[in-house]
Amino acid sequence: MLRVLRVDLSYFFRTKWLIATLVALNLSDMLVVGLIYSHMMSFDYFVFFAPGVVVSAMFAAALDVGRRVYLGLTEGVTQYYLSLPISLNALTWAHLLSAGFGGTIYGGIILAFALVAVPQLASPAILLFIPLMFVLSMGLSGITAVLNLFSKGGDRYWVFAEGVQTALLGLSTVFYPIQTMQAVLPSPVVGVVQVNPLSQAVDALREAAVSSPALTLGVGLQVGATSVLLMLVGAVGYRHVFAKVREDGKVS
Amino acid sequence: MNTKALASLFAFDFWEAFDSISWVVYFWFYFAFQFFVYGSLMANLVVTVNNYFFYYGAGLVVLLSFNVASWAGRRFVESAHEGRLRYLLSLPIGRGELFVSQLMLGVAVNLTRMVPPLVLVLWLSGLFTPWALVTSVLVLCAIATGIIGLMVSLSVIAFRSFDIYSAIVAALSALLIRFSTINYPISSMTAPYAAVSEFNPVTYGSDLFRRALGFNTSLLIDPYLATAVVVALCVGTLFVGMFFLSHVVEGVRSS
């Protein structure tokens, strides 16, 4: 399991163009978009937005496990893994753990940039956010299991992944405060925003910067609970995908 | 120019570009979501631009047009790596026809995807007139042509390494978009950012597009200067792309 985890994780950091894309997007978002919008708003949007960039970076890195599983399914890597003496559960957890590490490492790099750019974010409570990123990344990667299942290993995976990423980021407090959303969006949509794990994560990060560790722990537990739920969905989803591949040789 | 060969190439590529209906649906979903959700929420936060909702909507049309044009350039590179370009070069088709067919494809796909969002923005902003539609479509075509030419010119890198090409294009696209007036006016930028933005042709394209739509605010760059830059980008990248395809492209190394 650890070998599969290591190989899967190394694929993420080996894809140079993907890393370059993510870094360019995240840093330009933080240092250009955030700063410019600050001049256009009545509050310090840069300080508000920097934690949002960290969470969106972690989200993108965690979701990448879905791309790797999709490519593994289409290029026969998954079929090869299944021919090895490794259980379905071990294969499933290897991918979920790889997403956890990928999200934490990449999110951690962007967090380090954010701490340099916004020193106000630096607080002892921010350390609690690192293990939280790991659990959250594993949870968010669970979404990709569902996408792989519904796309049946087909090209529609990319459309589903892009659509889910757009919707989850757009309907979260990553880009805008909840008060603005409450003023503009209908209340059922605001309810969705509040249970969105990305909103919970970014609020936890913002809170970690200004609140006491005890308060942050409470928020952290909320994020952790949502993540574990998503992680379980992901585990069941990926196990089902791999079981189908083992039985039929393909997902559909 | 062999118009029959050009028409055959274009027709084949054009229908292939619409193979995946789900991408077209996603494209319009993305526009609608960003315009109505992100746009309206950000419009509530922005205090320095009057009617930021439509300012953003116009920028979003340019952004998506940029993405479609980038896709057209990237598709050319992918076709080279998949061996299709070698096959096309072995046919009795001139390099000029090949380049023009790629360009026409990019512009045609751009129009089919961008006209519905463009009409929506014009209609909702109350600026819809046939003149506004025609001029804004012309500006979009000019921007798309410039970006496709740029991407095809950059594909010379891909003939050495596809990974490096993808990394450069991704980073360049991110910087061209961020350091432009797609999302915010130049007056809102700090002096160093504004200086970079002034060297970015996308800045001039975005502001010219807003002028064509009928937005007339002091936030926009002088239309004559913007027109000159967009035309220069178009002509310049077309010449470079044409030169590259005629003299450099022979084959491609697999990455």
Image: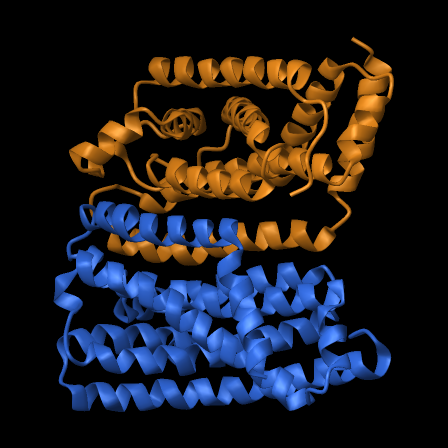
Q: Quadrant of the N terminus of chain B?
A: top right
Compare residues B130 and B242 and report the one nearer the observer: B242
Q: Where is residue B111 drawn, in percent x and y?
A: 63, 33
Q: Quadrant of the C terminus of chain B?
A: top right
Q: Where is residue A140 drawn, in percent x and y?
A: 49, 76
Q: How many marks?
A: 0
**Residue B252 shows in the view:** yes
Position above or below: A41 against B75 = below
Q: Where is residue B38 drawn, in percent x and y?
A: 40, 56
Q: In the image, is A38 to the left or to the right of B9?
A: left
Q: Where is residue A242 drawn, in percent x and y?
A: 72, 81
Q: Quadrant of residue B203?
A: top left
Residue drawn at x 45%, y 43% is: B60
Colour mode of the rendering: by chain
Q: Which chain is orange?
A: B
Position above or below: A12 against A17 = below
- Residue farthest along the top direction in this orientation: B1
Visual hue assigned to chain A:
blue
Q: In the image, is B148 to the left or to the right of A149?
A: left
Q: Quadrant of residue B152?
A: top right
Residue drawn at x 30%, y 23% is: B221
**Residue A191 shows in the view:** no
Residue drawn at x 82%, y 17% is: B93
